[in-house]
Image (tube, grey):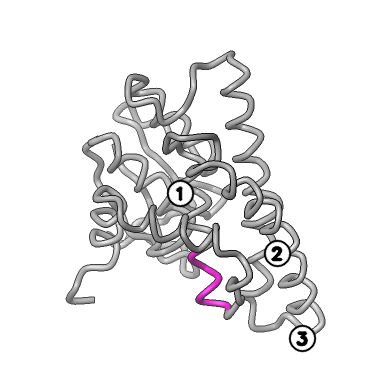
Amino acid sequence: MKLYYSPSACSLSPHIVASELGLSIELVKVDTVAKRTEHGEDFLAINPKGLVPALQLDDGTVLTEGPAVVQYLADLKPDAQLAPANGSMARYRLQEMLGYINSELHQSYMPLFNPASSDEVRSGRMAYLKKQYGLIEAVLGRTSFLLGDRFTVTDAYLFVVTRWAEFVKLDLSAFPNLLAFQARIAARPAVQAAMRREQPASA
C-alpha cells in the first residue's frame, strides 16, 4: 500500500494508525500546492480531489478521506481493536466522533492557515474551536481516550488536528485534560515512529 501524505497534515492520522497496526506502507510525499508527488507524478491523476491522505491499495484502488482511510486500515487487523466491529453501536459512536472531529475541529482550523483570512474570521474561528474543545475536555475528564479506556482511530485523528493549535497560535491552556491527552498520545512508540518518518532529523 502507498500512503500519499504531507508532513504534519491530516494524513499523519492514518500514518499513525498504520504504525500502531504494524502495517507496511510506502510513504509518498505530496506537494499539496503544486499537486505533484516527490517522484514528479501528477497527484491529481491519483486523487482528483488533490488532497491528502490518499491510500493506494495493492490492486491500484485509491481510497481518500481520512475518516474512511483510518477505518479501512483498522479493519485490516480487527484483533487490534482500533475500531469496533462494523454494525455495532460502538462503531457508530466511533463514526460519530470521527465526523465531529472532521467537521467541527478539522475544518475550523482551515481559515487559520489561510494568510488571507481577516482578523475577524481568525478570532471567530478560534472562539469556535475553543467552544468545541470544551466538549472534548469534558469527555477526556471521564476517560483516558475519546471512546473509553482503549486507543482507537479517533484518538489518532484528534491528536493530529490538535497539534495544529501550536502552528496557528491557538491557546489551549484552559484545557488540561486535552493537553494531558496530547502528551499521552505523543508518547506512544507508534506515534513517535510515524512522526519521525515524516520529519526526519535531517529535514
| SS at badge 2 | helix
- Of mark 2 and mark 3, the one earlier in the sequence is 3
Labels 1 and 3 touching (C-beta < 8 A): no
On residue 119, the disc is 3
Q: Position of residue 130 (x, y in %)?
A: 70, 66
* Residues drawn in magenta: 163-168
Q: Report the front residue among 12 and 38.
A: 12
The quarter of the picture where residue 12 lies is bottom left
Helix, strand or loop: magenta stretch? helix
On residue 53, the disc is 1
Disc 2: CA contacts within 10 A as few (<14), some (14-19) or many (>=20): many
The three-letter amino acid code for the residue at tag 1 is: Pro
Q: Estimate the spatial distance between the alpha carbons at disc 2 and disc 1, rounded to whole Å.
A: 23 Å
Labels 2 and 1 touching (C-beta < 8 A): no
The three-letter amino acid code for the residue at tag 2 is: Leu
Disc 1: CA contacts within 10 A as few (<14), some (14-19) or many (>=20): many
On residue 129, the disc is 2
Q: Residue at x 36, y 41 (%)?
A: 17
The quarter of the picture where residue 131 lies is bottom right
- For discs 2 and 1, the disc positioned in front in the rendered view: 2
